[in-house]
Image (cartoon, rainbow, N blue to C red):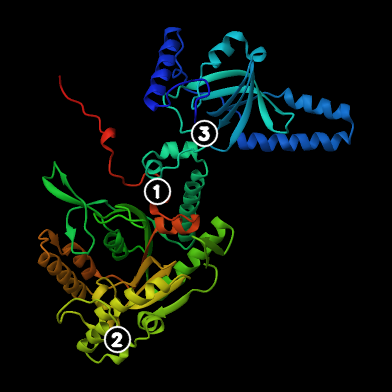
Amino acid sequence: MQELNQQGTTDTTDYRQIRLDKLNAMKNEGVNPFALTSYPVSVKNAQLREIYEQKEKAVLESANGDEEKISAGLEAIKAETVSIAGRIMSWRRMGKAHFLDIRDHTDRMQVYVRMNDIGKEAFEAFRKWDIGDIIGIDGFVFRTMKGEISVHAKSVTLLSKSLLPLPEKWHGLKDQDMRYRQRYLDLICNPQVKDTFVKRSQIMREIRNHLDNLGYVEVDTPVLLPIEIGASAKPFVTHHNTLHMDMYLRIETELNLKRLIVGGFDKVYEVGRIFRNEGMDTSHNPEFTTVEMYQAYTDYLGMMDLIENMYKTITHNVCGTDVITYQGTEIAIGKPWERLTMIEAVQKYAGVNYYDWETDEQARACAKEHHVEVEEGDSATKGHVLIAFFDAFVEEKLIQPTIIYDYPVENSPLAKRKPSDPAFTERFEYFMYAREMGNAFSELNDPIDQKERFERQVQAKRAQGNQNCQVDDDYITALEYGLPPTGGLGFGVDRLVMLLTDSASIRDVLLFPTMKPLAQNQTDITEE
């Protein structure tokens, strides 16, 4: 915010030097503004305002219009000392009396500081402080002539000196890139941003509560893995010096969680940090948070019910409503979700019937007729073409909560085949606002089928030049001991938070999103 007691250039470097000079002057006078290790805060700003209003109301009601009783009651409130602390956000100087706005994590509070109350020496020191400094105030609460609840300071304490000025008062921190890079400054200047992350915390708590109440056990599995599996996502690679081997940051938590089902857990889940060395856009960050859950003796139909009920419960408890507005569009999470097979969805939105294709060649010809891109040559099967039609015509139409199920086996390497039609798998994804929000399977528990699918994945990646990926033989061994019929589901926490906080970008719901460093932030230390 703009400094009111400094003239001339507004360059941040100059302001910093001015503040450094003030700091050095303080230290030369034996004052260290960083010396205190604590401060006895008695109440937060929002609570203080609430308490005063309640006491004021009680005085007015008990006085029954008697002015003397009202005056005596308000004076009694002033006799109570409070201690608050926070950052100076604005400063209005009027000779020997100053008004400050102090912000803590709950709200702002106006503070009245007068020389006659804190003493001339303390007041002279106080006048040299700056917007952005963190201070403590001891005093009493009163209501100003303009009706604003304020704290009348009896003493002021400098708790931490700010060496950099805050952004200009009337514009704040608006640059989106800088807000992501300097989230601490974003939170100072745009306190409403904090609400998003408070709501994120509430969402995480509701997720855990919902699963815990269903008898799920939360577990932790390794982030560093010894092999690169054949899945399509590209991992980050690091090196373990002691073991003399490369290791891979996990791209999912699935296989280890299913190992636990093999071991005898019936219901497990993990809130896991996932890392994928891929592209970045408004809905993708290289590291993100997922929840994956696995339940023995159920299937993908059971997981459909679970996720629909979970979303309805979380939305109601966090947002207080069953219908939210996301980017100007109402989304009725509380209503029954539409459920369509992929075949039904393509027929509904593209007017194409999968069952009209008797051969792969006919499917490819249909794709060409509708200008749907598939792989050239004879490699695209009917399943591939169905997926391509879904991507081209369906996904963008799925605004309201919709479950799409029964996916072709071609893009579902971990899902169990449908007994009635082995060309399809018992898999579903659910969509909102034309965005895939989660993925679920009736888990494949046939070790022979699973190994064959893993091998095809690895061969495909090696054909693309990646010679490091391997079949996870230990997982196959686990399946050979026996995985019961299991339903599994995973969803991205960040996308759920985006939805429930009406945030357009994933970076808006990550406190510290991945950013390319600015050159000037790189400190070059060289030996002289």
Picture coordinates of residue 68 (x, y %)? 88, 26
Picture coordinates of residue 417 (x, y %)? 28, 79
Q: 10 Å neighbourhood of mark 1: few (<14), some, or many (≥20)? A: many
Can residue 273 be seen here? The reply is: no
The answer to whether 210 appears left or right of 494 in the picture is right
Which numbered disc flags the more N-terminal residue, 2 or 3? Answer: 3
Which numbered disc covers residue 114?
none
Which kind of residue does numbered mark 1 sit on?
Answer: Leu
Pick the quarter of the image with the C terminus: top left
Q: Is mark 2 on a helix, strand or loop?
A: strand
Q: Which residue is drawn at 42% across and 50% down?
A: 508
Q: Which residue is drawn at 21% across and 82% down?
A: 381
Which numbered disc covers residue 510?
1
| Residue farthest along the front direction in this orientation | 8
Q: 10 Å neighbourhood of mark 2: few (<14), some, or many (≥20)? A: few
Q: Is mark 3 on a helix, strand or loop?
A: loop
Q: Quadrant of residue 362?
A: bottom left
Q: Residue at x 16, y 77 (%)?
A: 376
Give the vertical position of 287 relative to 458 (above or below): above
Residue that carries the numbered disc 3 in the rendered image: 169
The answer to whether 526 appears left or right of 95 in the picture is left
Give the vertical position of 251 relative to 147 (above or below): below
